[in-house]
Each structure stands twice: as structure tokens, then as C-alpha cells.
Amino acid sequence: MLNYEYPPLGGGAGNATYYILREFGKRDDLTVDLVTSSATGRFEEEHPADNITIYKLPIRKKSVHYWKFHEILSYSIKAFFYILKKGTRQYDLIHAFFGIPCGGIAWFHRKKLPYIVSLRGSDVPGFNERFTLPYTVLTPIIRKIWRDAAAVIANSAGLCALAHDTDSNLSIRIISNGIDTREFTIERSHAEKRFVVLSVARLIRRKGIDDLIKAIPEIVQQCPDLLVSIIGEGNMEVELRNLAKDLGIGHHVKFLGYIPHAELPCYYSTSNLFVLPSWFEGMSNTILEAMAAGLPIITTNTGGTKELISGNGQIVPPGRPDLIAMAIRQYIHDSSLRQEHGLRSRALAESMDWTRIAEKYAELYLELI
């Protein structure tokens, strides 16, 4: 298995890999080696289960969540040569998270092993405006990697449709992200007496956290005890802090920075509502976490995110702080709607347990082998 992200590095793809491996560790018919990146700058080898080994390659990673081109390139080169050195005879297939770079690494070994590509978002042309120029150069390579794969997986119908814009004839299966509902409770804690809106995301442009902050001034006129808790780090943190200050709502917005995953359930349980106003999204792990915690959701009609909303929240277009404010106000003033949508969130999350998702991947492996 190849993924340059693995906790604490990265976001949704790294978390997905963690939970899939945790489920695979319970099986006796699979043995998995993961080649990923080290967060410490040193080579590390971990054995979370008897049949799971994780090799973490040193790439001099600077930020936990934000990736620079040279870091991805460093991982790509080191992973390629590490696999060459280790050999491929003991394996039956390669599972690559992200078409680029991991799918490219797998492609070089295609004559020895079949490979699977799991599409995650930014590795699909058109997903992220920040990569418009690289997409222009890489699209023919990406198309070749997809076509030579034994299987291509998208984590949502929206991402699948976007990938078909690059290759309309490609056969793509859909296996969604999952959630461990045992980690979260729908019981609300009263640690905060204020109405708490929670957002958990990397503080980067495409997550749209600035749109959430812009929505707050209109709301606090009627709800002066509103608190917006923002968990995450990223290159926009200073800009977002200054935005809240300039809008005069600094005391209504709390930037909590990076919170270890094990501590997140506490923050979900002390919140009343979850908001993720992304401009681009595959299938958000943090929305799934909020659903498992029984929170109503406000999000945007983008990618796989909107597929998670079915009687458990509201969908707004990206870049519309006014509509975010309107939706938040509705939940503030209608406690029965909050409860109804929160219970529905939990029910939907329970149908997306990681055990079921991992089983789908295992079935695919055995099918291809």
C-alpha cells in the first residue's frame, strides 16, 4: 500500500488509510505493508498488528497538514527506490492512494504487480483551482496511470463524475470514506454555555473558512453568545485571524489549532452545529465525524460532501456567507430541527462504519488476485 499521508501527516486520505489498516489487522487472510512518510525526519517501522507493517520514509516534512512540491517529490523518489530495494515478489498487488504521486510509483511496477488507484480529490484534474497549471501538464500522465490500473476507486459519486471529465470511458468503482461511530457520542456536553458552531479543517483556501467567518457579524446581532470554534492549521491561519479581528468578531471566533484525533470527540460533543463551507471536497472525514457525533451539518454542494446530506443538514453554494448565516440562524432558533437533523446524522454515520468499507476493499483485492 502506498500513501504519502498517514497520521499525523495529512488529512482525509491518511485517516482513511489508518482505519482501513486497523480493520485489516483483524483479518488472517491479508498481509499489508504500507510505505508512507515520516513526521520525525527519521526512518521508522511500526507493526500495529501481526499482519500490518508501516514503513515511514524520512522526507524532512515541515508542516503536518500542508504539503510542498519538494516534499511530495522526495517521498516519490524514496518510495520508488525503497520498493525496488525491498522487492515485489512477496506481494500480490499494490494499492495506491492518490493517482499522483502514488499511482505513478505503482505504474512503474505494473509489469510485476497489478495496482489499484484510490482517487482522493486533488489528484483528479479540475478538483482544485490551485493546481490548474500542474493539471495541464499532468493530465495525460494521470489518464495513462488510470487506464493501466487493475481498478480505479473514487470515494464519492461526485469525484467519480469529475474523473470522467478526464476519461469518460474509464470504469470507476465507488467506495466511500467510513467512520468509527464508537469513537463519538451523540450526548451533548454543557462545557460551553454559548451556542457553539464547530469547523474542523485545514486552514487552506479551498476549505472556505473565510466564508464562515464572514457570516458571523450578521448572526451575532441576534445571537451575541455565539462561539465559532475552528480546529486546524494551515497557511491561511494568520489571514483568518486578521479577518475575524477586522470584522470585530475576534471574541466570537476561537482558533484552536491542531488537536490530536483522539481528543476531537470532546470538541464535537460540546458543539451544537458543524459547518464546512469548502469550495472543493472529495468526501470529508470531518463531516463524517460530526455526523457520528450527532450534529446537524451545513456544507456546500461540492464533490462528495453533498452526498452526505440527506435530512441531516443544509447545503449552500460555495462562497455565500449570507446563506451560511441564514442556515446557522435557523438552527439557533429551532432546537427541534437541530435534534431531528442530529439524530439523522448519527443514523447515516452508522451505515458507513469502517468495518464495512474495509470489507469492500478486501473483496476487491481478492477479486483482482
Image: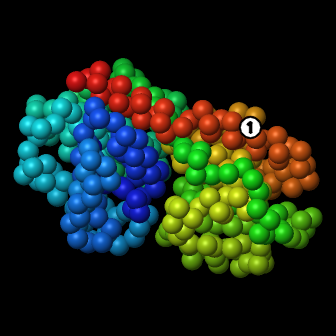
Residue 159 relative to residue 89: left or right: right
Q: In the figure, 174 relative to 266: above or below?
A: above
Q: How many marks?
A: 1
Give the structural element (helix, strand or loop) at label 1: helix
Q: Position of residue 263 (x, y in %)?
A: 57, 65
Q: Residue shown at 89%/65% (left/top)?
A: 223
State whether residue 319 appears in this view.
no
Q: Choose top left, top right, bottom left or bottom right for residue 28.
A: top left
Q: Residue shown at 34%/64% (left/top)?
A: 68
Residue 150 relative to residue 264: left or right: left
Residue 166 relative to residue 31: left or right: right
Q: Residue shown at 26%/44% (left/top)?
A: 51
Q: Amino acid at mark 1?
A: Arg
Q: Position of residue 285 (x, y in %)?
A: 54, 48
Q: Viewer-proximal residue, 242 or 179?
A: 179
Say which residue label 1 marks.
344
Q: Residue shown at 64%/46% (left/top)?
A: 292
Q: Position of residue 49 (x, y in %)?
A: 31, 49
Q: Position of residue 35 (x, y in %)?
A: 24, 52
Q: In the figure, 304 relative to 55: above or below?
A: above
Q: In the figure, 169 relative to 42: above or below?
A: above
Q: Viewer-proximal residue, 18 or 309?
A: 18
State whether residue 367 appears in this view.
yes
Instruction: Specify the quadrant that holds the C terminus.
Output: top left
Q: In the figure, 222 relative to 286: above or below?
A: below
